[in-house]
Amino acid sequence: MALFKKRTAGKAGEYYYCLKHGTVEEGPECRAADRFGPYATRQEAAHAMETARERNQEWENDPRWQEKK
């Protein structure tokens, strides 16, 4: 008996954005290092890259993360 069982099908209702393929997948299909998520809806997952860009921009402009001079 295997200690770890590979999940062959994703969990319904969880959506991920695959960075490797540039697609939305329901349930984790690709490895964790290659995806963002989980998201509650397919629409949220589809906009994962846009969300990441917006958050990165916010962090870059956040004074708490700026180097002290």
Image (cartoon, helix red, strand yellow):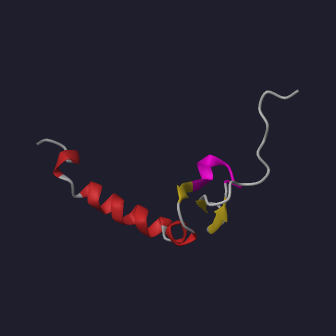
- In the image, 59 versus 36, the foreground residue is 36
Residue 21 location in percent, x, y? 66, 65
- In the image, 48 versus 14, the foreground residue is 14
Residue at coordinates 53% horizontally, 72% vertically from top-left?
43
**Picture quarter containing residue 68?**
top left
Residue 24 location in percent, x, y? 62, 67
In the rendered view of the protein, which quadrant contains the N terminus? top right
Which residue reaches farthest right? Answer: 1
33 is within the stretch colored magenta? yes
Vertical side of 5 occupied by 15: above or below: below
Q: Which residues are magenta?
A: 28-35
Q: How many circles with numbers are drawn on the protein?
A: 0
In the rendered view of the protein, which quadrant contains the C terminus? top left
Residue at coordinates 35% horizontally, 58% vertically from top-left?
56
- In the image, 47 versus 27, the foreground residue is 27
**Picture quarter containing residue 13?**
bottom right
Residue at coordinates 67% horizontally, 57% vertically from top-left?
27
Q: Is residue 67 left or right of residue 6?
A: left
Vertical side of 10 occupied by 51: above or below: below
Residue 41 location in percent, x, y? 54, 67
Q: Is residue 65 left or right of residue 6?
A: left
9 is within the stretch colored magenta? no
Which residue reaches farthest left? Answer: 69
Residue 39 location in percent, x, y? 53, 60
Residue at coordinates 55% horizontally, 55% vertically from top-left?
38
